[in-house]
Amino acid sequence: MWIKHVGRDGSIAEHDAEADIWRNDVAQRFHLQAGDLLLSEVVTGRPKAALVQEADLPAAAAGSVYVLRPRRVLPPEHTRLILAFLRSERVARLAYGDFGRSRIRRTDLAPLKLPEPDEALATALNELESAGRRMSRWSAEATALAGSVFETEQSLDEARRSIIAAGQLIRLRAEAAGELDDPDHTVRTRFPYPVALRLREAEARRSTGDLEPAYRAILEAAETLLAYAALVAGALARDAAIDLSSMALLQRKLAGAAGGPGLGEWTAILQEVAGAKKRRGLNPDHPLHELADLVPEGEAQQARSRLAARRNDAAHGRMPDAVDLPQALEEASHDLSLLVSRARFLADLPLIHVTSVAWDVFRRDASISYRRLMGDHPVVPTSFMNYPSSAVEPGSLYLVGRDHHLYLLRPFLTCEVCETCRAWSTFHGDKVKGQLVQKSLEHGHNYSYKADVEVLRQTGLM
């Protein structure tokens, strides 16, 4: 097997009985084994690297190919990580010689430290590779379809009709993929429901040209985004036994006789979790790390401050007048877009509503039915998954981490059918005229708190 048989994508060419060199005098120690890693000695651009599998055997490496044999069988995730490293610029820099004849010396490979297992990173790489392969298949389908127009004796009219019919799915794929470049589409379909609905309303209001409702919708969407992020951060911090002093501000608001929490309290929570010291010791893929980057120092923080000032002015009757309103709307929309761009990670942290849990004592896992509340509509199909813990509550909201761990959001966020509008909604604790209420993130409707107040006390919210 020569280096020409190894593709830059990690593929190994299939056997060719006519073109390949076949010998029966190769010593056994030179025979490749399934699990061996091949690395190109000659480097043009980046090194080639591939995994030998059973389908590639029998074979032996020849000419400018290094064979790296693991001392033990590696999990697929770890293998993918090592292959990505071997193809990296870091390994390419080991090569010496002129361009086109650069080589990696065996002595330079010996001290090279391969990456340790990292399931989250390996999974992310695998998802990227899978996406790349899928798009390559789609591209090949489109090319083959376009090339088939004149392969039959059909007329041009018949060819046009057949191409339109056969190419419909390909066109729809391309259109759907293209929509993902539109931030508004990502929000509508991939953001958590409370945030997505508020942002969709702001988008719709603005499209009508009715400036004052659009301006208010933008400010409400900004507050909902920050409130959702802060409430999730509070739940995650409690789960990780992280003490947040900013929670005392929230507690005083809910325990006092004045109004409930607002942008000031939500911002304080997010700013506190942004401190690296609070998150020390958490796994690298813990959701709190991403929430910490939502409003960092700089442009995003300035945008948040401007939106908070506008929200405060609007709440106290200090709306921009008819002359200033168009410019104020444009500036507020720009600031909101900046925050939304910082919050894109929310699309990868699903909000789910668990509807039932069945624990299997013998299998030691739970069968969970749930609704995935991502996008701007709460009517979604029920999905199912297995989970290795019985500590999951039916009826509660959970955040799904990148490692598929379920993080309980109760009592920071609860859910039920709203008594005011009869729409399924998410709620957080609030205070109105000295009375404890629950307030909908989606519509702002509020009424007497229905959940267990004692749980608020146990979690430090009261």
Image (cartoon, rainbow, N blue to C red):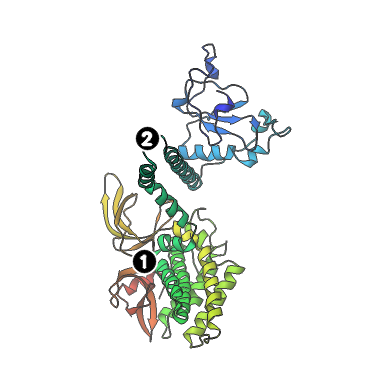
Q: Residue furthest right?
A: 98
Quarter of the image for residue 353 reads: bottom left
Viewer-nearest residue: 171 or 66:
171
**How far across and down, in percent of the image, does residue 426 sit?**
35, 69
Q: Would you say residue 110 is visible in this rendering? A: no
Mark 2, residue position = 153
Q: Would you say residue 285 is visible in this rendering? A: yes
Say which of marks 1 and 2 sits in front: 2
Mark 1, residue position = 410
Quarter of the image for residue 372 reads: bottom left
Point out the image quarter for the N terminus: top right
Q: Report how many numbered discs are placed on residues in the image.
A: 2
Q: Is residue 27 above or below residue 80?
A: above
**For the point 58% across and 66% down, which residue is it?**
296
Q: Disc 1 residue type? A: Arg
Label number found at residue 295: none
**How far across and down, in percent of the image, does residue 129 sit?**
49, 42
Q: Is residue 312 above or below residue 356?
A: below
